[in-house]
């Protein structure tokens, strides 16, 4: 067991182990292996970032739960390709929608679930205070979301066109990228609003009671 594993709080170890099991199961026979590999660049990049941060910054259990929830949503989308996730198809057919909106849901979830971990980094690592502890997460969510859309666009141009289009998942919507970025920002705004309500009610930052021992 590595030094990082020994130092990691118990909940974090369970979350990593649980996610690894789900990831391994969904790595078997994905709908489109090439699209799955492209989608998992996000997972590999996120894992590399956490490894780089080891020993320097430890997220609270609250942030760990939020980040794991987002990654689980993403790994499902990677397995089926976002436009073919069964839950999204069922909702599309049940409500007579024009497309599978699972990808839109996950972009919103990115802002909603990753907004607070970014706020925690802004407070504890960057030492941003007052309005900046709210602005920094919002700007970062929008920056990451727009960077991801740019990466998708170039992937669609560089790789096999069919694979690229499956990766982008626009489903015929010319404004898909702009809508995805807007939803991510909306999710982050909602996360900051919930945080503000929680702080007003409890008198402290939410992560405080969730810090690992």
Image: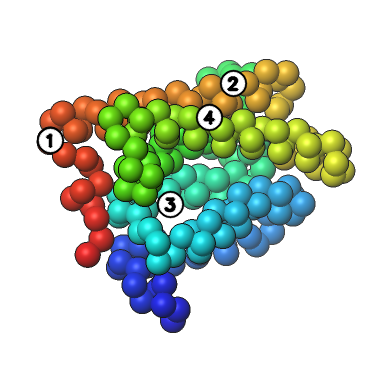
Q: Secondary structure at mark 1?
A: loop
Work out whether 193 lies above or below 52: above
Spatial CA distance of label 2 from label 3 is 24 Å
Label disc, if present, on residue 37 of the rendered structure: none
Label disc, if present, on residue 203 of the rendered structure: 1
Callout 4: 10 Å neighbours few (<14), some, many (20+)?
Answer: many
- The residue indicated by pointer 4 is 142
Dividing the picture into quadrants, the one containing residue 29 is bottom right
Q: Secondary structure at mark 2?
A: helix
Nearest-to-viewer mark from 2 and 4: 4
Q: Secondary structure at mark 3?
A: helix
Label disc, if present, on residue 179 of the rendered structure: 2
Residue 79 appears anywhere in the view: no
Indicate which disc, 4 or 1, sits on the residue closer to the N terminus: 4
Residue at 77 percent of width and 52 percent of height: 34
- The residue indicated by pointer 3 is 68
Indicate which disc, 1 or 2, sits on the residue closer to the N terminus: 2
Spatial CA distance of label 4 from label 1 is 28 Å
Indicate which disc, 1 or 3, sits on the residue closer to the N terminus: 3
Nearest-to-viewer mark from 4 and 3: 4
Work out whether 198 lies above or below 42: above
Spatial CA distance of label 2 from label 4 is 12 Å
């Amino acid at each position: 067991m590595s030094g990082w594993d020994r130092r990691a709080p118990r909940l974090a170890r369970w979350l990593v182990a649980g996610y690894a099991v789900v990831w391994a199961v969904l790595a078997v026979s994905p709908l489109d292996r090439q699209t799955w590999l492209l989608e998992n660049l996000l997972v590999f990049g996120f894992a590399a970032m956490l490894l780089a941060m080891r020993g320097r910054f430890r997220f609270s259990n609250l942030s760990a739960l939020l980040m794991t929830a987002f990654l689980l949503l993403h790994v499902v989308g990677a397995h089926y390709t976002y436009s073919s996730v069964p839950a999204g198809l069922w909702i599309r057919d049940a409500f007579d929608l024009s497309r599978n909106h699972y990808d839109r849901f996950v972009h919103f979830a990115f802002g909603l679930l990753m907004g607070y971990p970014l706020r925690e980094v802004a407070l504890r690592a960057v030492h941003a205070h007052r309005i900046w502890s709210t602005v920094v997460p919002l700007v970062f969510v929008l920056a990451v979301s727009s960077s991801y859309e740019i990466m998708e666009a170039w992937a669609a141009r560089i790789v096999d066109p069919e694979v690229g289009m499956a990766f982008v998942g626009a489903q015929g919507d010319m404004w898909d990228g702009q809508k995805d970025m807007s939803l991510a920002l909306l999710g982050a705004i909602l996360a900051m609003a919930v945080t503000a309500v929680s702080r007003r009610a409890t008198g402290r930052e939410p992560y405080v009671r969730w810090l690992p021992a």
